[in-house]
Image (cartoon, helix red, strand yellow):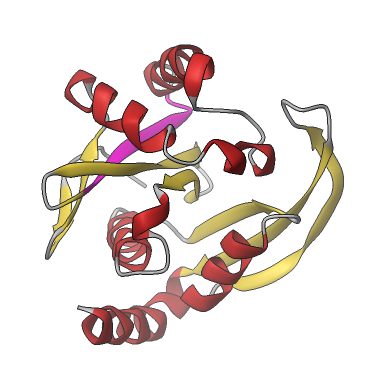
Amino acid sequence: MQLRGRTLALRQTRLEPLDAVHREGLRRAVDTDPDIWTLYPFPMAGEHFAPFWEGLLSKRALGYALPFAVLLESHVVGITCYLRINAAWRSVDIGSTYYQPDVRGGVVNPTAKLLLLDHAFSSGARRVQFRVDALNARSRAAVAKLGAVEEGTIRREKPTWTGRIQDTVVFSILKDEWPDLRERLSGRIGANA
């Protein structure tokens, strides 16, 4: 698996490898919804933004993450990442995704996921997985709507920044499942465009 950071685009949605030019746009996007952060294992907003940003860039430098700024037209509306990149196992996670409230439920998330999944599988991935906090009903529904298979729950997996211990629901899509799911997802995006 040779997963590389490069710009991925479809219609008005662009995923650009995270860079300094995205910093202030992403800061504005994550600050639009202060109440959501209790559902995340780590905060991105307010005074937490700088440590989040630096930590993510460190993870990228070490090869643990490949973050993308999510743009709608030319505006940063969120972030998404490849995580747990394992070239030997040909496996990768998609996660640490956030979208500002006004683009949730529209075409941005399915388009971003189509781009990321297509890139991962065309780069040699056999498996793409999603790990979602069991309390995050919106994210769980979005991943299930992609056609990912819910594999189970890792109970009391990890502490979150609030001290709550997270149960994590694991979903996956396998390479041989992707062609049918891609067609279905493309149709869904076309209907929302």
Give residue 4's position: percent from left, percent from top: 26, 39
Rendered position, 38 above or below 152: above
Q: Is residue 129 left or right of residue 69?
A: right
Residue plotted at (28% across, 87% down): 187
Rendered position, 39 above or below 67: below
Quarter of the image where one finds residue 18? top left
Look at the image and tell me in which quarter the C terminus lies.
bottom left
Quarter of the image where one finds residue 114? bottom left
What is the magenta range? 63-71
Give residue 117's position: percent from left, percent from top: 36, 61
Rendered position, 55 above or below 93: above
Say how many tags the image has: 0
The question of residue 69 being in magenta is answered with yes
Residue plotted at (51% across, 77% down): 145
Does residue 7 appear in the picture of this structure? yes
Q: Is residue 145 left or right of residue 107?
A: right
Residue plotted at (36% across, 56% down): 102
Give residue 171's position: percent from left, percent from top: 63, 64
- In this view, the residue in front, 97 or 121, is 97
Q: What type of secondary structure mainly makes up the magenta span? A: strand
- In this view, the residue in front, 90 or 57, is 57
